[in-house]
Each structure stands twice: as C-alpha cells, then as structure tokens.
Image: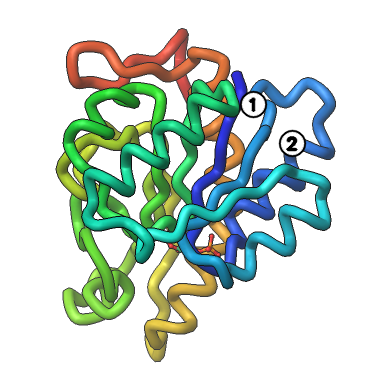
Amino acid sequence: RRAAILISGRGSNMAALLDVAAAQPGYPADIALVLSNRPGAAGLARAEAAGIPTQVIDHKAYAGRAEFDTALDAALEAAGIDLVVLAGFMRLLTPGFTEKWLGRMVNIHPSLLPSFKGVHVHEQALAAGVRFSGCTVHFVTADMDAGPIIGQAVVPVHPGDTADTLAARTLAAEHRLYPAAVALVATGGARLEAGRTVYDGDGW
Ligand code: GRF
C-alpha cells in the first residue's frame, strides 16, 4: 500500500511510523508522502530529513472546507496514495472526502474512545477521574473521533498527573500502537466492512 501521512504540527507519530517503516524492510505500508496543512509544521523537516516527499496545502489559501478537501484529494490521487494516515492532522474533513476514503483512512486519538473526543483530551480524562486512559486508532468517518475502532492501548493515570504528564505517557503508547495498527490495515488484517472493523484470524 502507498500511504500518505497527514500532519499539522510536531509529527512525532509520523516520525514513529517513518522509523518503524525504515527499520522493517517488509513493512507493508510504503510511506510515499507527508502532507501538512500548515507551512511551518515541525514534522515537515523531519520527513525531509528522512528523504520522504513532502507537500504543503495551506488551508488558509482555500475559500472553505470543500475547496481544501478537493485540493487534498487531488494531491493524494496524484501521488497514487491508497492509504491515508492522519497523525495530528487538525482539520475536520468534509463528508464527501471521508466517504471517498472510507476504509482507507485512519486516525489516532489520545483517549480510549468513545470517551473524550475532540480537544483538551487529557484535561477531560483527568476531570472525569478515570484511572486508565490510552489511545485509539480508528477508521475515519464523517463524525469526528467516532469511526470504527481498529486498535487501542491503555496507560494508567497516576495520582498527581497533569494533562502534560498524562499526554507524555499516552504519546509513548501512541508511538507503539500506530505503526502496528497501520501495518494491520495495510495488509488487510483489519478492514472496514458494513460499518464494522473485521479482523483476520485473531486480529491483535
Ligand atoms: C497526538 O496525541 C495524536 O493522538 C493527536 O494529536 C497528537 C499529535 O502529536 N491526534 P504528533 O504531531 O504526532 O506529535
């Protein structure tokens, strides 16, 4: 599979994916493009250093979401992409775009979905008093952070945690989970059928 990673910022999940793909010769996703909606995204330099083609599609240059998504779709098609990996990509996508890429687009979110969607996720988890949090990889649908779950990893919440300490512990789990989940999707070992994730064999 030819994958594009979409970022908006730091790109540490992107870097984890690039590292695993580089270290494993048979890694099933060929990361062919890193695309950012923000020109200054730190992850772009990291991708360039790894020799991965990068592209910026600045959402501010477009009249609205539909126009931006049309440009995004054209860039993905031009690069021959068949798997879209959202990694800290902070744009809501239109239903037309999510429908077109349904089953071929995944996201990682730093909570155990369906709890704590959206932003300020770790603040939400701490306010709720949960003793465990984690991260979720899911297929992307039109509803934000609500698509069928592919994989999750759990981290403990410690007494005295702040949003920052919980975020750091969760991020380390994200960096382990995402490369494994993307590989599972890229091989077809996890796929979307009739609105559900189905797994080959025992899945995880
Ligand atoms: C991660 O916590 C991810 O789960 C969320 O945004 C953050 C992106 O971090 N969607 P990075 O850009 O991958 O470092």
Q: Which residue is mark 1?
A: 29
Q: Pointer 2 and pointer 1: residues touching (CB < 8 Å)?
A: yes
**In this picture, is 167 found above or below 89?**
below
**Residue 34 position in % (x across, y down):** 61, 46
Q: Nearer the viewer, residue 22 or 9?
A: 9
Q: Nearer the viewer, residue 177 or 195?
A: 195
Q: Earlier in the sequence, mark 2 or mark 1?
A: 2
Q: Which residue is mark 2?
A: 21
**In this picture, is 65 found above or below 95?**
below
**Residue drawn at (45%, 46%) of the image:** 86
Q: Is residue 163 left or right of residue 140?
A: right
**Most extreme residue toward the bottom, as rendered?**
160
**In this picture, is 127 found above or below 18?**
below
**Residue drawn at (19%, 57%) of the image:** 115
**Residue 55 position in % (x across, y down):** 60, 49
Q: Is residue 18 left or right of residue 79?
A: right
Q: Is residue 178 left or right of residue 92?
A: right
Quarter of the picture holding the N terminus:
top right
Q: Quadrant for residue 25, please give it.
A: top right
Q: Quadrant for residue 182, please give it.
A: top right
Q: CA distance from mark 2 to mark 1?
A: 7 Å
Q: Does the residue tagged 1 have its C-beta within 8 Å of any atom of ligand 1?
A: no
Q: Is residue 64 left or right of residue 197?
A: left
**Residue drawn at (28%, 75%) of the image:** 120
